[in-house]
Amino acid sequence: MKSEGVSEKKPRLLLIGVGNQYRKDDAAGLIVVRSLKNQAPAFLEIIEESGEGASLMERWREVDGVIMVDAVSSGAPPGTIHRLDARRQSIPTDFFSYSTHAFSVAEAVEMARILDQLPPRMIIYGIEGESFKFGTGLSPALESAVPQVAESILNDVEIMSKETERKQERL
């Protein structure tokens, strides 16, 4: 994806897919980022993480923006897509309740907020899961949500890129 008028200095944007590929719908974040590896702009770093909070905080240090995607469990219908701007709103701690880590995504975001270590832009996508049992393969509702989230992420990347470039031009 290239934009006209884009300067040579590209923003440092990070896309993090969170999940466990052997816990059915918990793999949704991993599958979304894997689907974008061949169509994302070169300046977008794409990584996969288990969701351990300290590791996440280390990963997003010194970047211009982060987009993270993970499966969630909030009671909404399976496949529901949640989009949260972590700079503007708190992350519900029970959202990522299927993490095997006590210090997971929500706790990492809120700790970074307290320590003033959130990146300048941070968008979190949560895809409502149906089954977090051991096994592989997503529920049908999540399979349908994956391309929608991927398209939304590409739109966010373009917006973040332009915002960062405008900010850099003013400096």
Image (cartoon, rainbow, N blue to C red):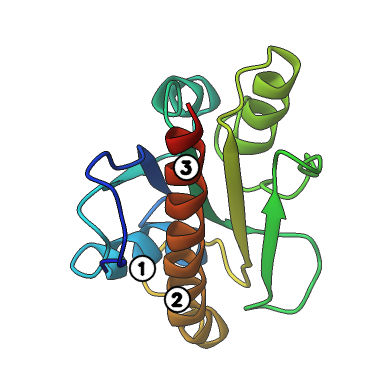
Secondary structure, mark 2, is: helix
In terms of sequence position, does the residue under pointer 3 or pointer 1 come before the other? 1
Q: Residue at x 49, y 40 (%)?
A: 65
Q: Is the residue 113 above or below the residue 142 in the image?
A: above
Res 41 visible? yes
Q: Residue at x 31, y 55 (%)?
A: 6
User: Is the residue marked by circle 3 packed among few (<14), some (14-19), or many (20+) residues within 10 Å?
Assistant: many
Query: Of 11 and 40, which appears nearest the observer?
Result: 11
Q: Residue at x 45, y 29 (%)?
A: 60
In terms of sequence position, does the residue under pointer 1 or pointer 2 come before the other? 1
Mark 2 and mark 3: Cα distance apart in space: 20 Å
| Marker disc for residue 164 | 3
Q: Nearer the viewer, mark 3 or mark 1?
A: 3
| Marker disc for residue 136 | 1
Q: Residue at x 54, y 26 (%)?
A: 53
Mark 2 = which residue?
151
Please state which amino acid type lies under the numbered disc 2.
Glu
User: Is the residue marked by circle 2 packed among few (<14), some (14-19), or many (20+) residues within 10 Å?
Assistant: few
Q: Tell me: 127 left or right of 8.
A: right
Which quadrant holds residue 45? Answer: top left
Q: Is the residue 145 above or below the residue 20 in the image?
A: below
Q: Nearer the viewer, mark 2 or mark 3?
A: 3
Asked if labels 1 and 3 touch by Cβ distance under 8 angstroms, the answer is no
The image position of residue 111, as x and y in percent, is: 69, 20
